[in-house]
């Protein structure tokens, strides 16, 4: 029996971010004979968000909402936990060792955990798809570290939040039975390197191609903001420094002539994502006089995103740091060619594509322009070669990945 924790203040939904991974993994897990039950934990009263996942195997998958304890219990308990961590960080004794505070702390903790104690103990192992979780478990845990990008790009958050995240990551990985990731680069760089975890505590399982955006008939309805088909580059990513949106902005003035044989106007750029365009990037857009060619759409529906993929000239991912990129695979699923940042993890992800992949230096707008020029020489031919490579990538299924994850789960249970 496997528990998968999907409550991180918001519920991991099947159509977004890590929720896409969870939904795809469950599709493979329901075919594994060693698993008799999968328990999905959502935020309280958001159980319906994971109902599509439950329908994959209604007899074997159940959902429970993680009820919040009342404030009169939760707040004193959180205060005592913070005090306990500060003491430990200074090298002091745990509150549990205190003759006065110890019993008080345990009294609050027992009552805070009481409502969930039955289902916390009802499985043999817990999978934590994300490391940002302050929750104790009575059973073995496997935690997934997707990447530690904020460690390497601290300007993407506040110093206080980064310090809090580092404390939490250390706590969760220290307490985990096994720590896993989905990239050899992340294993070596972040798990063994940044966190200094022992090799015997780490595992790596490669993902398969997600199926979230491979459904439905083609929708070639009108594009937003009077965009024309084949006239724009698409980058679906939230605005964070390591996502490197500025490279596309800087490249625009250098590719004015590149697309004119194929379009009636200069090439545009379309950004989608859950965050607003930051002020420094707005100033850069104004300084380069390309405001009329940069379209910030914010969060869009999955149908709208699929439509954007289908009609884009190319999808460009210029990120400085990633475990892997779902947009690259989503783009190919809709027949749109891709250009990728030349970083180790994306080289690793696209290895099955061979020389059909197009890479560029994420620090050089000239390198991006050269990659676009190479695509422009034979866009259709390059796309067909990329799609052939994509077909090879899809030979690895989520059943394959789930089978390997089950080996990791069994190792975690056995090691306890």
Image (cartoon, rainbow, N blue to C red):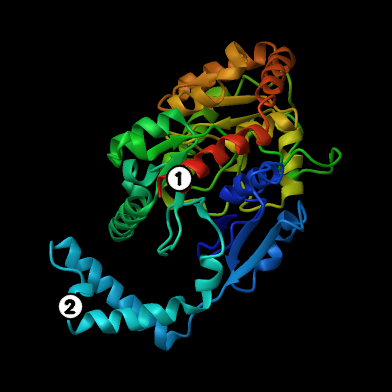
How far across and how far down the image is residue 359, in percent? 52, 20
Q: Is residue 290 visible?
A: no
For this view, does 409 lie left or right of residue 104?
Answer: right
Would residue 167 appear left or right of 143 to someone viewing this image? left
Judged from the image, the secondary structure of the residue bearing numbered disc 2 is loop
Question: Relative to 210, does residue 74 appear above or below in the rendering?
Answer: below
Residue at the farthest left position: 91
Q: Residue at x 82, y 44 (%)?
A: 222
Residue positioned 43% across, 62% down in the render: 137
Residue drawn 30% across the image and 72% down it: 81
- Point out which mark residue 98 bears: 2
Per the image, the residue denoted by label 1 is 414
Q: Nearer the viewer, residue 326 or 362?
A: 326
Location of residue 325 in the rendering, given as x and y in whole percent from the top left corner:
55, 35
Q: Nearer the viewer, residue 190 or 158?
A: 190
Q: Earlier in the sequence, mark 2 or mark 1?
A: 2
In terms of depth relative to the viewer, which is nearer, 227 or 134?
134
Q: Residue 45 placed where, x, y %?
A: 64, 74
């Amino acid at each position: 029996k496997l528990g998968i924790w999907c409550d991180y203040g918001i519920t991991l939904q099947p159509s977004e971010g890590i929720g896409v991974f969870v939904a795809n993994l469950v599709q493979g897990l329901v075919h594994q004979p060693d698993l008799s039950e999968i328990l999905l934990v959502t935020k309280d009263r958001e159980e319906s968000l994971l109902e599509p996942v439950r329908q994959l195997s209604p007899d074997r998958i159940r959902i429970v909402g993680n009820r919040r304890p009342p404030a009169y219990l939760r707040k004193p308990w959180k205060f005592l936990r913070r005090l306990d961590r500060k003491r430990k960080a200074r090298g002091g004794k745990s509150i549990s060792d205190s003759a006065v505070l110890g019993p008080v702390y345990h009294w609050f903790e027992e009552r805070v955990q009481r409502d969930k104690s039955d289902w916390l103990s009802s499985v043999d192992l817990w999978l934590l798809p994300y490391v940002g979780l302050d929750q104790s478990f009575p059973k073995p845990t496997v935690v997934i570290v997707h990447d530690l990008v904020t460690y390497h790009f601290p300007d993407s958050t506040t110093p206080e939040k980064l310090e809090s995240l580092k404390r939490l990551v250390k706590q969760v990985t220290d307490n985990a039975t096994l720590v896993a990731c989905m990239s050899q680069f992340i294993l070596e760089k972040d798990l063994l390197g940044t966190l200094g975890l022992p090799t015997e505590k780490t595992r790596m399982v490669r993902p398969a191609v997600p199926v979230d955006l491979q459904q439905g008939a083609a929708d070639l309805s009108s594009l937003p903001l009077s965009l024309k088909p084949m006239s724009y580059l698409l980058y679906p990513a939230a605005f964070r420094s390591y996502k490197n949106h500025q490279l596309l902005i800087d490249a625009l003035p250098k590719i004015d002539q590149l697309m004119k044989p194929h379009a009636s106007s200069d090439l545009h750029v379309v950004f989608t994502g859950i965050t607003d365009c930051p002020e420094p990037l707005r100033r850069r857009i104004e300084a380069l006089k390309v405001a009329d060619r940069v379209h910030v759409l914010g969060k869009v529906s999955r149908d709208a995103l699929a439509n954007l993929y289908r009609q884009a000239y190319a999808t460009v991912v210029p990120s400085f740091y990633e475990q892997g990129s779902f947009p690259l695979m989503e783009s190919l699923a809709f027949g749109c060619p891709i250009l990728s940042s030349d970083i180790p993890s994306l080289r690793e992800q696209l290895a099955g594509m061979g020389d059909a992949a197009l890479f560029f230096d994420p620090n050089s707008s000239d390198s991006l322009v050269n990659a676009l020029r190479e695509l422009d020489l034979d866009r259709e031919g390059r796309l067909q070669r990329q799609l052939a490579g994509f077909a090879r990538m899809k030979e690895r299924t989520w059943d394959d990945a789930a089978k390997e994850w089950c080996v990791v789960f069994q190792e975690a249970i056995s090691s306890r």
